[in-house]
Structure formats: structure tokens, C-alpha cells
């Protein structure tokens, strides 16, 4: 019986980890693109919240998950445009703008949820289109997330646009002297990243929950930022970090059956993220000192 419980727990962790990795990978690759142009995109959480709410709303109104994902991408892009305008055009502090946008989107969804649906904490939809399942409990976006990591690496290191983004982020003065429009490439990176984060957010209510809950991103945007920091903005490493963080989060649920306190289970993913990022910073400082 014990072996059956362990097998069931491992199976749950595998499937739940893969599913929770999808929004982290989309947001993480979006953040990795921002890192290429030397912009610290702390607004990923707000972009995911926007994608989750407006993607769910569109799916509820149309009955189409595909439309929901598209509107989620557009919502994330619009928030990213605000972030880009404030940080690139107005030269505002990236951390302050990111925090303000995150708080603003939390407040906005708290206002729009009762205005649109007459609900306060959450709304369950009978009409929203859900992302279809293939191969049992898997869905197409799980495979698309894996392809996105490959695409991110190819885009950053094998395309002219990626090369110019890295030039803009590495040495702004030299890139400008070479004729690269640094501001334009920063906008481009942030807007693409915002659209990806919006899709990651929209995935949350459309992957089977069929509902929107206030705060349903639950800090995933911040964990995605941690994955970007851990991976130094390299898409492959960022994707791997997102996968590790998602498995750490998924493991907390079945482990509660083995006596793990629920409070510790809730904080474990964030503790794991903080430890991983701390180790990365320590190693980076050691390499710099040596």
C-alpha cells in the first residue's frame, strides 16, 4: 500500500509539475527576452494577471479557448507596453514601475470581477472554452512550452533581431554607434515578452479550472523572474529552472499526506526559488572575485 501511495504521489507530481511549468515557461522566456536588452522585467506578474483575467473573460464570452489565449496575449502585451513606455521612454525605475503595475493589475481585477460577473472572490464559468486534452491529461501547450524554449534559444542566438537585442543590452553606446535603435529593440523585447506572459496567465483559468480567482497567479510572475535571474536570461537554462520550480511546487500537495505541515507546503516553492537564486548569485560573485 505504501508503494502504491508513493507511485501515485510521483505520478501526481509529474503531471502537476508539467502543467504548472507551462505558465512559468511562457513568462520566463518572456522575461529572458527582456534580459537580453538589459531590462529587469519585474512586471511579469501583472502581465500574467492581465492575461488570466481578460483571457478568461474572452473565453467565457466566445466559448473559445483559442480566442481566450489570443486576448490573454494581447492583454499581456498592453501591460508590457505601459511598462516599456515608463521604463524605456520615460526612463523610470524598472523595479518601481514593475511593482506598481503588479499592484495595479491586482486592484483592477478586483474591481472588474464584480463589475463583469457580479462575483467578488471568484467566478466559475459554464461557458468558457477549455484547452483540450491530448495523450490523457496532457494538453498542446505543454508541448508548445517545450518548443518555446527551443525557439527562444534560436531567436536570441541565431537571428539578426536577437543579435541586435543582445548588442543593445550589452553595450548601449556601441550598439547606438553601430546604428542599432536601442529603444526600439527594447520595446520589441518587452512587447514579445509581455505577450508570452499574457498567454502564460491565460493558461491558468483555461487549462481545466474553468474559473477565475483573484490572485490566481499566486506569485508565478515573481517565480518566473527568479527563473530568469537563475538562468542569466539564457532561454534553455530559464526553461529548466522554470521546470524545477514547478516540480517543487507540485510536490508540496502529495507530501502533505506524509505529515508535511500545510503552511510549510505553501511556502516551499518560494523557499526553493529563493535558495536557488541565492546560490546562483553566490556562484556568480565567486567567479567574479576569482
Image (cartoon, rainbow, N blue to C red):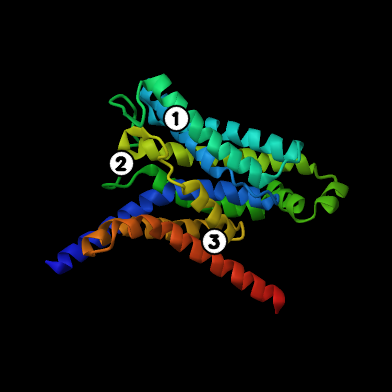
Residue 191 vertical position relative to residue 248 in the rendered view, above or below: above
Q: First in sequence: mark 3 or mark 1?
A: 1
Label 3: element kind: helix
Identified at 54% across, 61% down, the residue is: 237
Residue found at the very far right of the displayed protein: 177
Identify the residue under disc 2. Answer: 133
Q: Quadrant of residue 103?
A: top right
Q: Locate the C terminus by quadrant.
A: bottom right
The correct choice, above or below, for 211 with respect to 159 in the image is above
Residue labelled with disc 1: 110
Q: Position of residue 105 (x, y in %)?
A: 52, 34
Please say whether residue 33 is visible from this viewpoint.
yes
Q: Nearer the viewer, residue 148 or 80?
A: 80
- Residue in the foreground of this view, choosing between 242 and 158: 242
Look at discs 1 and 2 and give the one toward the viewer. 1
Q: Nearer the viewer, mark 3 or mark 2?
A: 3
C-alpha distance separating marks 1 and 2? 30 Å
- Say which element carries label 2: loop
Q: Are marks 3 and 1 in contact (CB under 8 Å)?
A: no
Nearer the observer, 20 or 185? 20
* Dot label at residue 237: 3
Q: Earlier in the sequence, mark 1 or mark 2?
A: 1
Amino acid at each position: 500500500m505504501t508503494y502504491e501511495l508513493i507511485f501515485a504521489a510521483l505520478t501526481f507530481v509529474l503531471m502537476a509539475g508539467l502543467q504548472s511549468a507551462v505558465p512559468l515557461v511562457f513568462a520566463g522566456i518572456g522575461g529572458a527576452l527582456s534580459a537580453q536588452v538589459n531590462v529587469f522585467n519585474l512586471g511579469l506578474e501583472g502581465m500574467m494577471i492581465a492575461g488570466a483575467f481578460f483571457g478568461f473573460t474572452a473565453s467565457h464570452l466566445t466559448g473559445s479557448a483559442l480566442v481566450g489565449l489570443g486576448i490573454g496575449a494581447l492583454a499581456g502585451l498592453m501591460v508590457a507596453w505601459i511598462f516599456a513606455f515608463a521604463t524605456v521612454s520615460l526612463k523610470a525605475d524598472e523595479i518601481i514601475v514593475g511593482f506598481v503595475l503588479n499592484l495595479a493589475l491586482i486592484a483592477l481585477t478586483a474591481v472588474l470581477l464584480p463589475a463583469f460577473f457580479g462575483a467578488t472572490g471568484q467566478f466559475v464559468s459554464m461557458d468558457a472554452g477549455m484547452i483540450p486534452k491530448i495523450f490523457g491529461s496532457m494538453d498542446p501547450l505543454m508541448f508548445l512550452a517545450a518548443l518555446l524554449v527551443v525557439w527562444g534559444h534560436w531567436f536570441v542566438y541565431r537571428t539578426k533581431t536577437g543579435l541586435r537585442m543582445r548588442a543593445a543590452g550589452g553595450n548601449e553606446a556601441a550598439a547606438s554607434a553601430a546604428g542599432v535603435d536601442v529603444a526600439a529593440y527594447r520595446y520589441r523585447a518587452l512587447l514579445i515578452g509581455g505577450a508570452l506572459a499574457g498567454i502564460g496567465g491565460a493558461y491558468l483559468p483555461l487549462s481545466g479550472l474553468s474559473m477565475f480567482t483573484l490572485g490566481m497567479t499566486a506569485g508565478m510572475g515573481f517565480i518566473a523572474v527568479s527563473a530568469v535571474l537563475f538562468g542569466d536570461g539564457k532561454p534553455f537554462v530559464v526553461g529548466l529552472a522554470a521546470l524545477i520550480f514547478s516540480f517543487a511546487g507540485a510536490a508540496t500537495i502529495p507530501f502533505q499526506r506524509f505529515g508535511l505541515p500545510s503552511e510549510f507546503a505553501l511556502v516551499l516553492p518560494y523557499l526553493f526559488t529563493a535558495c536557488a537564486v541565492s546560490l546562483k548569485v553566490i556562484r556568480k560573485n565567486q567567479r567574479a572575485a576569482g
